[in-house]
Structure formats: structure tokens, C-alpha cells
């Protein structure tokens, strides 16, 4: 009994010592445990095979597997028809498959180092990831860094896109790939050849790294830098970028092409030209779907003989309508239109120029200045209207400048043989030696005549011309005639206040080099002039009545007077001269209406006459005046050839009668 108890006590003590030893062993760390774990993770573990053979060669354990071989290392899974495992090395052949995360790899044969996790894939290699497939015959792939290098021809395929090159790398983890040597991309409407490019597999974008040639639909493109988005069909071309499409050639520092909205954007020294047009600017945007082009920064658009320039230009290549602003101009065969902004609608043939508008007729050397102009390209029609300032026309005449201001100026060339200018409402004319006012004016290139309507008055030096209408006739850009029709009246004002006067139904003055040579008065002609003696003292007045008479001049002096019927003359001494006898009937000295300078011409009147527009509403009364004037010309030279009574000649008086200058 005591012996049994003693044995039990000994066994209990031994158990306690054994438990303490076990517990002590568990608390004490094993210095080789980490290395064992690392060694375990660096070994490929074969989970399945139909058959296997184990052999030991030179102290190395070699295992051969065949049939449905399945192996893994960490999160890497491998499948093959057969495999050989020697330590950290594995060789597999026959429909080899590697699966890692979302990447699948296929090959005919594989060499794999489980320590470095580097796989060498041979023959019929395919890498599938994120909807893309890479095909090659040789690939070195690091399953740890997910970085692969191919040294044989490789093809990357995504849906309809195929990208190929001789060599390169594929970084699956960073979604980057680089293709080098004989790079080619083929897509449904896009072909590319290059020396090298980078490819972002995440966003499907190809980056150009050197000389690159692209064919996109009908476009031929060259650049040395940029990118192309395979999915969005957007592209960026830079560094010597050029696009050729048929006869169109385009180049810029940067070019952006978007298939989404059918736009092509050229930025930096951009120029686009074809067989009929040239576009230039710091920025050019073509919308090929809408047939629109926008240009900015020292922009210009030239089509045939029309050149548009401005800070900004919008142009519709289909309708040929446009809008431009910022010190803009439109040049053509007939002239140049400048303004702060210009718009034109080809369909209606109507355009508007606003802000400091200037029309220069380069053929006739004429200029119109206005705050706003309306124009038509088909007939070189320009209508200038009053805004803050009145429109102004000017032209060089006799080495001087002739200015015409009015509330409305209208210039047009309806055909090759006629160019005309109309001035309407409060017309003022200014030249250094000639000034005039009227309500309306017409100038036609056929006879080079300015016709003044409705209360016209002209001044030259101290002489005033008036009549129902007045013609100022140009010959070789010089004033050759001044003709006053119907109730014609000429007044030459003396410093003393007396006035020499001539009146008649029609009065025509002929000038040569701005010198009055002859003055013909037709129809109820009357003259009144004051005679001085040799001491320049007034002697009296001489009043003459005759149906027609002509005054001839030598220099600035009257040479003689020719009467076509018997004149009736009355000489009245100064002491017998009444106030009524100092003036002929109809005398009206209108010096207050005389323009004094350019500043006055453009000043807007407080009360404006209605602006007559030939393109809206009923015809202007002015049209009737013009037609009447053009339809009933009066040839003075012809009238002198008509049969008359015996001609009388009166000796030259002591003072000259009214003259034109």
C-alpha cells in the first residue's frame, strides 16, 4: 500500500517536471523559426498531379510531376501538363498557366525561381489583365514586382486595337508599358508607327517618345511628342507636329484632336492652309462636324481674295459667314474694312462693323470713317450711320483732301462701271479751298460728279454758291467745274460788307488747276458788282440783265464778258445807291452754315434728321432727286452753240465779278 502511494508520488513529480519543461520550451523563442518560415514561403508547393517521381541526384532532391499539375506559392497559382521541381527552381511545360490576382499568363514552357519570383516564359506567351492581352514568344516576368520584359516581338491587344514592337517592358503593377523598335498600332480608324512609345494600360493611352507617324481616317500626322487615347479617341501632338489631309496642311507647337466633339485644336504659331484658304493664329480650333473654325491671338483667315484679321475670328467654312473682333479688318479686291468688331452673314449678304469702323476703297483711294457700318460684299456696299459721331468720307483731290460728313454715308459698286457715294441728312463738305453744306449728296464714278441736293451752299474763299442743286465735277481728281442749277446764286463778299452777285437759272464755273477760267450763266441772268477807281474807292454799282452771259478770266482778273442777247445795264453812283439796290432778289449770305474744320464735321447735331435706308421701307425721296439730276443733264457747251441774237461784248470792268476762288 505504501509502495503504491510512493510510486504515484514519483509519477506526479515526473509529470510536473515534464509539463514545466514543455511550458519552458514554449516560452523560449526558436532562433531558426523565421528562417524556416521564409524557406517555406520561397518554395513552390505542388498541390496536385496525376503522377510524380522522386529521385536524388548529387545530394539534390528532384521531383517530377505529370498530369494536371497544380502548384502555388503565396498568392501565385501555377498549372501545367508536367513540371520538375529542384529546390527553389521549377520548370514546367505544356499549357502552362500562371494566375496572380487579376493577371493570367499562358505559355508553352516556364522556368521559375521561387526565391526571386522571376518567371521566364517561352513560346506562345500570353498575358491577360484588365481587358488587354499581351502576346510574345519570350517574357521575363517578376511575379513579386509584377514587371515583365520582352525581347522578342510583342503584341498588345485591346478589343480592336493592336499594338506591337520588337522589345519593351510591361509593368502590370503600375499599369505602364513601354514598346521599343518598330512600334505599330492598328485600330479601326487609327494607324501609328514610331520608334518607341509608353502605354498606360489603366487609361489606355499611348505616349509618343520620338518621331511618330499616324494615319487617322484621312489625316496624315507627324509629331515627336504627345499621346493618343485609345478609348476616347482623343490625341495630343507636339514637337514639330504636322497634320496633312488632302490639300490641307496644318502645323502648330501643340495639336489636340478630339473625336468626341469632332474638334482639332492648334496652339502656338498655328497655321492651317489648303488650296483656297490660309488660317493663322496663336490658337485655332476646327470643328469638323459643324464646319466651324475659331482663331485667337494675331488671328487671320484668308480665302481666295478675302483676308480677315483680328484678335478673335469665328468662321463657318460651309456658309462663309464670320465674326471677328479686337482691332479686326477684312480686306478684299476693292478695299479694307477695319473696326473693333465685324460680323458677316453670307446667306443674307449682310455685315456689320462696329467701333472705330474704317472703310478704305483701295481702288478709288477713298475712305469712310464711322462708329458703325453695314455692308454687303456682293456689291461692295458700305453704309455708315451716326452713333456717337457722324460718319466721315474723305478722298485726296488736287493734292488736298476732300471731306464729306453726314448722318448717313452709303458707298456701293453695283457693277463694274459704276461706283457711287450717297450722303444723307445734314451733309457737310470740307476742303482747304472749298466748303459746302446740303441735306443730301450723290457722287457717281461715271461722271465723277458730286451732286448736292436740298438747299445746297458752297463757299470758296469769300465766294458763296447756292442753288436748288449744285454739281462739283472732278477730272483726274481735280475740281474742274462747279455747277449751280435752278435759282443759282453767287455772292462774293467784300471786306467792306458789299457783295458782288450773279444769279440765273443755271450757273457753271470752269476751273483749271483751281483757277477760274470761265463762268457761264444761263436763263434770266443777272449780275451786280461794285466798281472801284484806281485808288480802290467805290464808284458805284453796275447791274446787268441778260438771258445768258459768259465771264472769261485771265489769272485772277476778269478779262471780258460775253452776252448772248442784248444786255440791259444800269450804273448807279454810290451816293445814290439805296440799301435795296445793293442786293439782287434772292440774296442770302449763309456764312453761319459754313464748315470751319474737321472737328466740326463729325460732331453730332442736337436734332437729327431721320436716317434713310435704301434696304428697308419705301424708296427715299433722295432717290427721286438723284434720278432727276442724272436723267436731265444740262450741257452748257452745247447751249452755247444754239442760235442766239447778235453777241455783244462788254469791256472788262474796274473790278472782277464773283469768282470761284
Image (cartoon, rainbow, N blue to C red):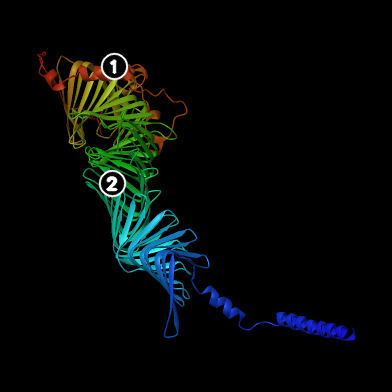
Describe residue 295's horizontal placement relative to residue 515 as left or right. right
Residue 52 in the image, given as x and y percentages of width and height: 43, 70
Q: What element carries label 2?
A: loop
Toward the right, the furthest residue is 2
The residue shown at (19%, 37%) is 513
Say if 111 sits above or below 230 in the image: below
Check disc 2: other Cα within 10 Å, few if <14, some if 14-19, many if 20+.
few
Q: Quadrant of the C terminus?
A: top left
Identify the residue under disc 2: 217
Describe residue 277's horizontal placement relative to residue 583 as left or right. left
Residues 355 and 305: in front is 305
Residue 148 in the image, given as x and y percentages of width and height: 40, 67
Q: In which quarter of the image is the N terminus?
A: bottom right
Q: Which of marks 1 and 2 is in front?
A: 2
Residue 239 in the image, given as x and y percentages of width and height: 33, 60
Q: Are marks 1 and 2 in contact (CB under 8 Å)?
A: no
**Residue 210 visible in the shown view:** yes
Disc on res. 624: 1
Residue 16 in the image, given as x and y percentages of width and height: 80, 82
Residues 569 and 218: in front is 218
**Mark-to-mark CA distance, 1 and 2:** 61 Å
The residue shown at (30%, 26%) is 441
Amino acid at each position: 500500500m505504501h509502495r503504491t502511494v510512493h510510486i504515484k508520488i514519483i509519477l506526479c513529480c515526473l509529470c510536473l517536471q515534464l509539463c514545466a519543461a514543455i511550458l519552458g520550451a514554449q516560452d523560449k523563442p526558436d532562433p531558426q523559426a523565421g528562417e524556416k518560415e521564409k524557406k517555406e514561403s520561397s518554395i513552390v508547393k505542388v498541390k496536385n498531379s496525376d503522377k510524380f517521381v522522386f529521385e536524388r541526384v548529387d545530394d539534390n532532391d528532384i521531383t517530377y510531376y505529370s498530369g494536371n499539375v497544380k502548384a502555388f506559392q503565396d498568392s501565385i497559382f501555377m498549372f501545367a501538363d508536367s513540371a520538375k521541381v529542384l529546390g527553389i527552381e521549377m520548370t514546367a511545360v505544356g499549357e502552362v498557366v500562371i494566375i496572380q490576382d487579376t493577371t493570367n499568363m499562358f505559355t508553352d514552357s516556364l522556368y521559375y525561381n521561387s526565391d526571386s519570383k522571376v518567371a521566364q516564359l517561352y513560346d506562345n506567351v500570353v498575358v491577360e489583365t484588365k481587358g488587354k492581352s499581351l502576346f510574345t514568344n519570350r517574357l521575363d516576368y517578376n511575379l513579386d514586382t509584377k514587371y515583365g520584359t520582352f525581347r522578342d516581338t510583342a503584341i498588345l491587344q485591346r478589343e480592336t486595337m493592336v499594338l506591337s514592337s520588337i522589345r519593351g517592358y510591361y509593368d502590370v503593377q503600375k499599369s505602364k508599358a513601354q514598346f521599343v523598335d518598330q512600334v505599330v498600332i492598328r485600330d479601326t480608324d487609327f494607324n501609328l508607327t514610331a520608334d518607341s512609345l509608353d502605354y498606360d494600360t489603366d487609361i489606355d493611352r499611348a505616349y509618343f517618345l520620338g518621331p511618330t507617324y499616324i494615319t487617322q481616317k484621312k489625316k496624315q500626322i507627324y509629331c515627336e511628342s504627345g499621346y493618343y487615347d485609345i478609348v476616347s479617341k482623343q490625341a495630343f501632338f507636339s514637337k514639330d507636329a504636322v497634320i496633312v489631309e488632302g490639300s490641307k496642311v496644318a502645323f502648330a507647337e501643340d495639336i489636340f484632336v478630339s473625336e468626341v466633339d469632332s474638334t482639332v485644336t492648334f496652339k502656338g504659331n498655328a497655321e492651317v492652309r489648303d488650296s483656297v484658304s490660309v488660317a493663322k493664329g496663336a490658337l485655332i480650333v476646327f470643328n469638323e462636324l459643324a464646319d466651324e473654325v475659331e482663331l485667337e491671338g494675331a488671328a487671320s483667315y484668308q480665302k481666295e481674295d478675302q483676308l480677315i484679321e483680328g484678335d478673335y475670328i469665328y468662321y463657318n467654312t460651309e456658309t462663309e459667314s464670320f465674326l471677328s473682333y479686337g482691332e479686326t479688318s477684312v480686306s478684299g479686291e476693292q478695299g479694307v474694312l477695319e473696326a473693333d468688331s465685324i460680323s458677316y452673314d453670307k446667306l443674307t449678304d449682310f455685315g456689320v462693323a462696329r467701333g472705330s469702323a474704317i472703310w478704305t476703297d483701295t481702288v478709288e483711294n477713298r475712305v469712310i470713317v464711322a462708329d458703325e457700318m453695314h455692308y454687303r460684299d456682293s456689291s461692295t456696299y458700305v453704309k455708315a450711320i451716326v452713333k456717337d459721331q457722324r460718319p466721315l468720307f474723305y478722298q485726296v483731290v488736287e493734292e488736298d483732301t476732300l471731306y464729306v460728313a453726314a448722318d448717313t454715308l452709303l458707298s456701293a459698286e453695283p457693277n463694274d462701271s459704276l461706283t457711287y457715294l450717297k450722303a444723307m441728312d445734314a451733309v457737310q463738305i470740307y476742303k482747304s479751298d472749298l466748303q459746302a453744306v446740303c441735306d443730301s449728296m450723290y457722287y457717281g464714278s461715271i461722271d465723277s460728279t458730286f451732286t448736292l441736293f436740298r438747299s445746297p451752299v458752297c463757299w470758296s474763299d469769300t465766294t458763296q454758291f447756292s442753288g436748288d442743286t449744285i454739281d462739283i465735277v472732278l477730272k483726274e481728281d481735280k475740281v474742274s467745274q462747279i455747277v449751280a442749277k435752278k435759282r443759282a446764286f453767287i455772292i462774293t463778299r467784300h471786306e467792306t460788307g458789299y457783295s458782288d452777285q450773279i444769279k440765273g437759272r443755271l450757273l457753271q464755273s470752269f476751273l483749271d488747276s483751281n483757277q477760274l477760267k470761265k463762268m457761264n450763266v444761263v436763263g434770266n441772268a443777272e449780275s451786280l458788282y461794285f466798281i472801284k477807281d484806281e485808288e480802290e474807292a467805290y464808284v458805284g454799282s453796275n447791274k446787268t440783265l441778260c438771258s445768258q452771259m459768259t465771264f472769261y478770266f485771265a489769272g485772277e482778273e476778269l478779262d471780258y464778258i460775253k452776252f448772248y442777247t442784248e444786255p440791259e445795264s444800269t450804273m448807279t453812283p454810290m451816293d445814290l445807291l439805296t440799301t435795296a439796290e445793293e442786293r439782287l432778289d434772292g440774296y442770302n449770305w449763309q456764312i453761319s452754315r459754313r464748315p470751319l474744320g474737321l472737328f466740326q464735321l463729325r460732331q453730332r447735331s442736337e436734332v437729327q434728321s431721320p436716317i434713310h435706308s435704301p434696304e428697308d421701307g419705301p424708296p427715299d425721296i433722295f432717290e427721286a432727286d438723284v434720278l432727276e439730276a442724272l436723267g436731265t443733264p444740262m450741257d452748257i457747251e452745247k447751249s452755247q452753240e444754239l442760235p442766239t441774237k447778235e453777241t455783244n461784248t462788254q469791256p472788262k470792268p474796274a473790278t472782277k465779278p464773283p469768282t470761284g476762288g
